[in-house]
Image (tube, rainbow, N blue to C red):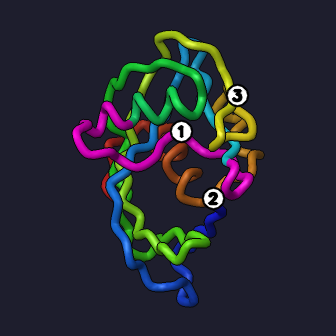
Amino acid sequence: MPRRDYEDDPNAPRANSLVPAASVVVVDDAGRLLLQRRTDNGMWALPGGKMELGESLADCGVRETLEETGIHIEIDGIVGTYTSPAHVFAYDDGEVRQEFSICLLGRPTGGELRVSDESLEVAWFTPAETDGLPMVPSIRKRISDWRSGSGPVVR
């Protein structure tokens, strides 16, 4: 389902949904980040998605990372919280979701890179390599917050 991100855009549609979600900055022993290129907008992003009933936030991050990338992880911490009402995602079905994401920090414990129905590509990148990748501002902000080492942040 294609989506369009709006951040600090006065012409953005009004939110009609709020869904708890987790994203994960997964860092391997070489200091590289795990990213996926999303099928819904073609942009590079952290693995993540909406929380399901009956799971913890950490469980959500672990599940979404495995589903989207093929990599098993453990959660080590929190990068930050991202809940700006000025950031919404508009979907083709009419849902306009206000951002509500907790960005976790994780490390790989196994698995092999693979794409899913939500990812066109999956790869490891050095922090510097992420600078040139096409991604929405909110994902770039999360990576920047992790790189600054000042977390956890509240945004």
In the rendered image, which residue does mark 3 sit on?
Answer: 123
Q: Is mark 1 in CB contact (under 8 Å) with mark 3?
A: no
The residue at the point 52 percent across, 24 percent down is 27
Kindly identify the amino acid type of the residue bearing the numbered disc 1.
Pro
Kindly identify the amino acid type of the residue bearing the numbered disc 3.
Ala
Residue 48 included in the magenta stretch of the image: yes
- Give the CA separation, mark 3 to mark 2: 17 Å
Quarter of the image for the C terminus: give it. bottom left
Quarter of the image for the N terminus: give it. bottom right
At mark 2, the secondary structure is: loop
- Give the CA separation, mark 1 to mark 2: 14 Å
> How many residues crowd mark 2 within 10 Å: few (<14), some (14–19), many (20+)?
some
The residue at the point 55 percent across, 17 percent down is 28
Q: Residue furthest front?
A: 93
The magenta span reads: 39-60
Q: Nearer the viewer, residue 138 or 131?
A: 138
Q: Nearer the viewer, residue 98 or 8?
A: 98
Spot occupied by residue 71 in the image (x, y as percentages of width and height): 54, 20
Of the two numbered discs 3 and 2 on the same chain, state the one appearing first in sequence. Answer: 3
In the rendered image, which residue does mark 1 sit on?
Answer: 47
The residue at the point 41 percent across, 79 percent down is 15
Kindly identify the amino acid type of the residue bearing the numbered disc 2.
Val
Q: How many marks?
A: 3
Q: Relative to residue 100, is residue 36 drawn left or right?
A: right
Spot occupied by residue 85 in the image (x, y as percentages of width and height): 38, 74
The residue at the point 63 percent across, 43 percent down is 118
Residue 16 included in the magenta stretch of the image: no
In the rendered image, which residue does mark 2 sit on?
Answer: 136
Q: Relative to residue 114, is residue 146 drawn left or right?
A: left
Q: Is mark 1 in CB contact (under 8 Å) with mark 2?
A: no
